[in-house]
């Protein structure tokens, strides 16, 4: 056996040993059920021919992939048998006591919804994914970050991708799109949070403050801290093997919902961080109360027009990226770099949730929490934007155009013309 072959064999054996060590210390990860076998979306740029060194790296990566595929597939069968013995059906309970004002004012409807599976739901999903893929590949639609690869996405921008290794699921959460309840579902599935020493079994039992605690969830941005230089490779394997989903919403309605929940309700954090600067910059207030309760008592509130000014101000993002509640979905979930298996919409939440749980093969164990009668309706758009200048509306559409187009929402022509 010549030296190059010996060297390569040594590399492969060393790599296998390193990966085994990673697996041993794989805290909070119980390798998954892989219900869908999908691939990462194709790169958008042509690659140059690899050099001999690059070819060896690719062959090495292929060896690692093959090893992990076999290891994970074997482990998933063992997990499947053990879970079947222990899991019992999980059903949502009756109406809980709501302790959070924001959740209570939304107008939850706690009556059960028996979502009917229509014959064309599969076709609807195919169409949504096709629209997404087509516009990601279409040069006529341009927006920042569209052409970059998954490897180019900074680690901190992967913090919305929640991983459930028990069931092989990745959920990209979008604030103001039923993310509280989907996070609850992910907690139940992954068993990442305990109640009295046992995992939560009913999503509605999970307190809201725990749902939005980042330490509760395993997200992609935490991988580097756990797996070091192997983190991106493990992410790609999970993206290839796991079922990936997100839920979206009409972009303008999502903005209205964000404004209502963060600026029409008393929220000290958003008052100090966002409302105070807005009131100073766009409402000419120089002396403002220290607390949101004092401001509300004095009648000092951010107007919807102030909020739109803030979004359109070029200085806003020079100071910091948009807050997640109004950041564009393409920046939160990277749909042109990640090939999502399921695209749900808030407008069809009940039907889509039931379909997704069936797809994940957990529908007999878990029901999505009852949805609420959405008080931020699409029909309100004209009223909310009535006092917003036409030029501002047009600029705002350009800012969120990619979300409209990628996810199949019609251009709001009635708001964009005189």
Image (cartoon, rainbow, N blue to C red):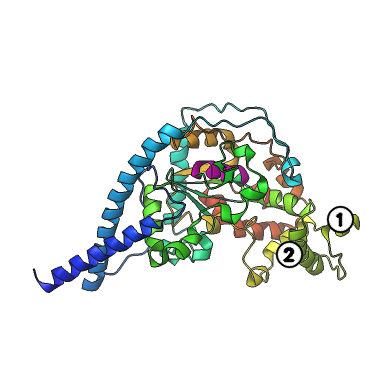
Tell whether 293 sits left or right of 410.
right
Tell whether 37 sits left or right of 126.
left
The kind of secondary structure element at disc 2 is helix
| Residue furthest to the front | 197
Q: CA distance from mark 1 to mark 2?
A: 16 Å
Rendered residue at 35%/50% (across/down): 39
- Packing grade of label 1 (10 A; few <14, some 14-19, many >=20) is some
Q: Position of residue 86 (x, y in %)?
A: 45, 34
Mark identifier at residue 273: 2
Considering only order in the chain, which callout, 2 or 1, is on the residue closer to the N terminus?
2
Which of the pair 311/25 is nearer the observer?
25
Mark identifier at residue 412: none
Q: Position of residue 250 (x, y in %)?
A: 61, 46
Rendered residue at 67%/68% (across/down): 316
Residue 265 vs 331, above or below: the answer is: above
Rendered residue at 58%/36% (across/down): 202
Rendered residue at 88%/69% (across/down): 287
Report the magenta residues as a range: 180-190
Residue 349, located in which quarter of the rendered image? top right
Residue 216 colored in magenta in the image: no
Q: Is residue 44 among the parts visible in the rendering?
A: no
Q: Which residue is mark 1?
A: 296
| Residue furthest to the left | 1
């Amino acid at each position: 056996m010549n030296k190059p072959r010996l060297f390569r064999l040594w590399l492969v054996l060393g790599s296998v040993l390193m990966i085994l060590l990673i697996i041993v210390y794989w805290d909070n990860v119980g390798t998954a059920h892989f219900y869908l076998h999908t691939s990462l979306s194709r790169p958008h740029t042509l690659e140059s021919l690899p050099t001999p060194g690059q070819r060896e790296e690719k062959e090495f990566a292929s060896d690692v992939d093959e090893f992990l595929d076999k290891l994970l597939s074997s482990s998933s069968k063992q997990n499947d048998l053990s879970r079947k013995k222990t899991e019992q059906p999980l059903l949502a309970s009756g109406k809980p006591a709501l302790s959070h004002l924001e959740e209570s004012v939304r107008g939850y409807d706690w009556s059960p919804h028996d979502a009917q599976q229509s014959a064309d739901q599969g076709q609807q999903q195919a169409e949504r994914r096709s629209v997404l893929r087509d516009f990601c590949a279409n040069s006529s639609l341009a927006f920042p970050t569209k052409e970059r690869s998954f490897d180019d996405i900074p680690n901190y921008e992967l913090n919305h991708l929640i991983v459930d290794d028990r069931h092989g699921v990745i959920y990209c959460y979008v604030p103001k799109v039923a993310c509280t309840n989907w996070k609850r579902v992910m907690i139940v599935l992954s068993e990442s949070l305990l109640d009295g020493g046992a995992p939560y079994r009913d999503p509605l039992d999970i307190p809201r403050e725990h749902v939005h605690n980042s330490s509760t969830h395993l997200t992609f941005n935490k991988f580097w801290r756990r797996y070091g230089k192997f983190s991106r490779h493990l992410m790609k394997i999970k993206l290839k093997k796991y079922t990936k989903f997100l839920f979206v919403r009409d972009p303008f309605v999502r903005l209205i919902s964000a404004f209502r929940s963060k600026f029409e309700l008393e929220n000290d954090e958003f008052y100090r961080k966002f409302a105070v600067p807005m009131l100073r910059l766009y409402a000419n207030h120089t002396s403002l109360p220290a607390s949101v309760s004092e401001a509300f008592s004095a009648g000092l509130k951010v107007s919807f027009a102030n909020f739109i000014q803030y979004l359109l101000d070029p200085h806003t993002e020079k100071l910091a990226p948009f807050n997640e509640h109004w950041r564009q979905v393409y920046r939160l979930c990277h749909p042109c770099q990640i090939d999502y298996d399921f695209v749900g919409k808030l407008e069809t939440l009940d039907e889509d949730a039931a379909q997704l749980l069936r797809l994940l093969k957990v529908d007999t164990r878990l029901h999505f929490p009852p949805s609420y009668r959405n008080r931020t309706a699409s029909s309100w758009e004209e009223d909310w934007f009535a006092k917003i200048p036409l030029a501002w509306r047009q600029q705002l559409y350009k800012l969120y155009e990619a979300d409209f187009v990628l996810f199949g929402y019609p251009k709001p022509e009635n708001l964009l013309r005189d």
